[in-house]
Image (tube, helix red, strand yellow):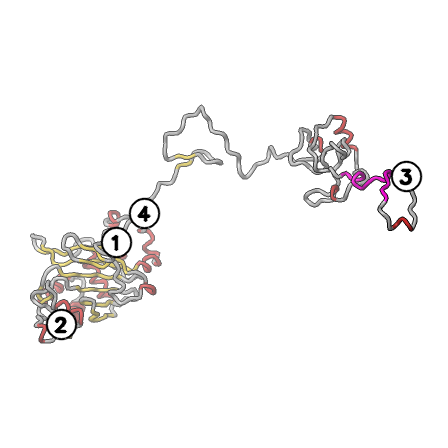
Amino acid sequence: SNGLPHTARTSRSHASEPLMHPDLKPSSQLLFTNVGTNPAKKKSAAAATEGKKRNSLPTGTSAQDRMRPGGGSSQPSLSAGGGGPGGSSALPRKSGGSSKDGGASGVKTPDVTNKNLLHKQKQPPNKNKAASSSPKLHQDDDSADVPLAKPRKIPVHPYIANVKSPGVWEDPQTKLEYLTDLSGYLGHDRREKGRHTLMGVGLYTRTVFNIKVYGCAFYATKRDVLADPSYAPFAAMDASDLRSRDDFYDLLMSESSRVDRTLFLQMNMQLATETMRTSLDADWSLMTPEHKSLLISSSFRERNADERMLRRIKSKENSSRCSCGQKAPPEYEADPECCARGTELVFTWKKDGTLELRIDGRIMDAFDDPGIGRAIFYEYLRGDDPM
């Protein structure tokens, strides 16, 4: 039989129920529909040899069965099962057999046993080997024991961490208060210039009794310090290391440092204006007589008192109503010949070389000569005998 139907259909029977021909095989029996669906079975050596000799797929195999999963057009050979029920898959296996040609499937798999892999497999721990007692070593997957880097403690700013109130640090020896950020005091926009941060506080004492005359604080603009590469070698040092580095203090009082710096002097006692004049004139050794005269006369020149000075005149701590050279209305009964405890004398040396002078937050004068700024900062930062 050639597979054709033996029963003829007339034109009348076309509209009747469909007639099934028992001798006509359905399409499901002509195609290997189970290829790639049934699990592979073990093959004998003879079956594997016969599968290798086949060069093409049997008639009736669909085009999808002749395509590899990767989209290739080559035709893998079938096993001895012929692809029928119970036969093995014609698709390549993920893991081949023991033969070099890929096992019973006939697909050759690459040998990667001798390749240098990028990621090595983790070796199981050796139970017989005692654990290392050293906490500084660790075992890496690809290397031997490597010493861990020594952990660095995050530095804490001592003045910011120990503030009396937000933004204010109190000196325990004098009870004088200092702002931790001076940008607002100087009239700077912090978003534009950054913080003017408190970096250190000291005391100026006189006589053998160590009378605490005034406190001295040093400020620097944080953004300028981070942008100046001259400060990079000192970044990892703490305060104890920096005390012995003369080159660090030379940089702080150098004209080449591109950093805004401020010396903030605050009186710890009431002083006469003339005493402050003579004291500054005697102590500023590096400054020329012309610079001293210019600076002192500008500092204590008579001016009308501003609102801040008027509040200081009427404060309870200022019992003598000192106005520190500034003229107040008669009802305040101010004394311009003295300066009260807490009076602030502030020198800001800008990175363009200009020196700004303030008293109690009020700017008194500005000097373009960078030598004046260097002379003042030298007196308070020099290593041999600082003020």
Q: Which residues are magenta?
A: 19-32
Numbered disc 1: secondary structure: helix
Q: Quadrant of residue 293?
A: bottom left
Whichever of labels 2 and 1 marks the residue nearer the N terminus, that label is 1
Residue extending farthest top = 128
Whichever of labels 3 and 1 marks the residue nearer the N terminus, that label is 3
Q: Position of residue 192 (x, y in %)?
A: 34, 65
Please give the residue where the numbered disc 4 appears in the rendered image.
Answer: 154
Alpha-carbon span between mark 3 and mark 1: 101 Å
Please give the residue where the numbered disc 3 appears in the rendered image.
Answer: 2
**Residue 24 magenta-drawn?**
yes
* Residue 340 shows in the view: yes
Whichever of labels 1 and 4 marks the residue nearer the N terminus, that label is 4
Q: Amino acid at mark 2?
A: Gln
Numbered disc 4: secondary structure: loop
Q: Residues within 10 Å of mark 1 (few under 14, many from 20)?
A: some
Q: Amino acid at mark 1?
A: Ile
Please give the residue where the numbered disc 1 appears in the rendered image.
Answer: 160
Whichever of labels 2 and 4 marks the residue nearer the N terminus, that label is 4
Residue found 17% across the figure and 64% down from its top: 344
Residue 151 or 241: which is nearer the viewer? 151
Are circles 3 and 1 on residues that touch, CB within 8 Å?
Answer: no
Total number of numbered discs in the rendering = 4
Q: Amino acid at mark 3?
A: Asn
Please give the residue where the numbered disc 2 appears in the rendered image.
Answer: 326
* Eye-nearest disc, 3 or 1: 3
